[in-house]
Amino acid sequence: MVTLGPFLKRELRLLARQKADWLNPVLFFVIVLSLFPLGVGPEPNLLRIIAPGVIWIAALLSVLLAAERLFKDDYRNGVVEQLVASRQPLLAFVLAKLLANWLSTGLPLVLLSPLVALLLNVDMASFTAMVLTLLLGTPLLSLLSVLGAALTVSADKGGILLALLILPLYIPLLIFASAAMEAAGMALPYHGQLAVMLAMLLFALALVPVAVTSALKINVS
Amino acid sequence: MFKWLHPYAKPETVYHLCGRLMPWLMGAALLLLLLGNIWGLAFTPPDYQQGDSYRIIHLHVPAAIMSMGTYSAMAIAAFTALVWQVKVAQWSVLAIAPIGAVYTAIALITGMAWGKPMWGTWWVWDARLTSELILLFLYLGVIALSGAFSDRQTGAKVASLLAVVGVINLPIIHFSVEWWNTLHQGASITKFAKPSIDPSMLWPLLISILAFKILMLALLCMRLRTAILVNEQHRPWVKAMAGD
């Protein structure tokens, strides 16, 4: 953990210099959301009903958009290879990637949620649930997309493959997150769904970094 | 135990072992499949509620059980391939995946065909159906991932890793009927309790399950032999066999 600092600093500096990498997915999120009222009609009640699913699907897709480039540059210019060869703890690198990925794709979605609530006519109770599910769910999205990116980093056609691998794993999250928001919309308790999401997050946090490390090693060798 | 297992890590031994086992397995599978299905489809009494349409369980239940059983076999092979770097295990992951995908597809399609007259709909987004669909996507993911790399070895390893990660879905499918209140019914056959299905229907069903299991092994032998030949084509023993 001692080496986490420099790695994180490097990731954040890269993100600050390549703003398109994280701004585009966030922009994509907002654009997709603003297309829905145009597509299904601006009826406020209808928007309120479809809001949970729409918000979460847009979040999944925007995180997926950011995932493809996660390890690509570091793989192409040999950083991953050097790290594996130098016997540096790869785990610190992976954790820094994760944290930077969440800060650049997950956190903006949470910060944008008031705007989204306005766009889709979400009431106050559902809005609280939305912020909570996004806070618990986006780290899990980051974990899974880092895993997918690590698996496909040296693949020839990474992009569509990544979607095929990762979207099925997103399904449980999608189910519980939108169930929590629907329950909140009907003024029912939703602690159960939040607890399950937290359990999934902790479980993934314990195991995914290990899987990512070995996936990177396989891709380099 | 490792001393006893060791020769089976050698592709040549496995190739010949599969060749010896395959005709027996294939014969037994076909025999049991015919026996179980003819008995189940023609000679069992109709269900008092569902009439004759319940008979599709003789395809649906074995395929569904084996879709999960095949996945666990694939995951064990994948784990072996990753931890002990056994080549044959790596190839068997890729050999098993399409078999499992077809079983999963059979389970889903027969389930839909049964759901139409019984539930009145082809598909509901219920926990068991959804998780079985995810299982199909996982199989397809493993197949697609293994083919996406220019280096065949890397593809096999990465696909193995995905197979191990996907194990998380198995308990979800298995317990989905208990954890959530779903439209799909609970298990009718369990190991410990008395089965909630009449013996006259149970026996042909058990035979069909066994038949699907043996058929999986037979197909695995067949596909694994091909995989070994493809991967070892430049080895002397293959060349000697081909008469070069």
Image (spheres, rainbow, N blue to C red):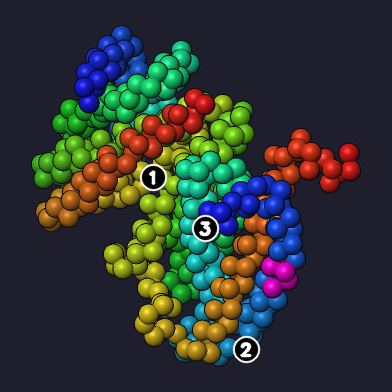
| Residue farthest along the front direction in this orientation | B3
Q: Report in which chain the residue with disc 2 lies.
A: B
Kind of residue at disc 1:
Leu
Q: Secondary structure at mark 1?
A: helix
Of A50 and B100, the residue lying toward us: B100
Vertical comparison of B123 with A21: above or below = below
Q: Secondary structure at mark 2?
A: helix
Q: Quick check: can you spot residue A8?
A: no
Q: Which residue lies under the disc numbered 3?
A: B1
Mark seen at residue A91? none
Residue lying at 42% horizontally and 52% vertically, measured from the top left? B167
What span is colored magenta in the figure?
Answer: B24-28
Q: What is the crowding at mark 3: few (fewer than 14 residues within 10 Å), some, or many (at least 20)?
A: few
- Secondary structure character of the magenta stretch overall: helix
Q: Which residue lies under the disc numbered 2?
A: B43
- On the image, the x and y values in percent for residue B205 come to 55, 79
Q: Which residue lies under the disc numbered 1?
A: A169
Of B160 and A134, the residue lying toward us: B160
- On the image, the x and y values in percent for residue B143 come to 57, 43
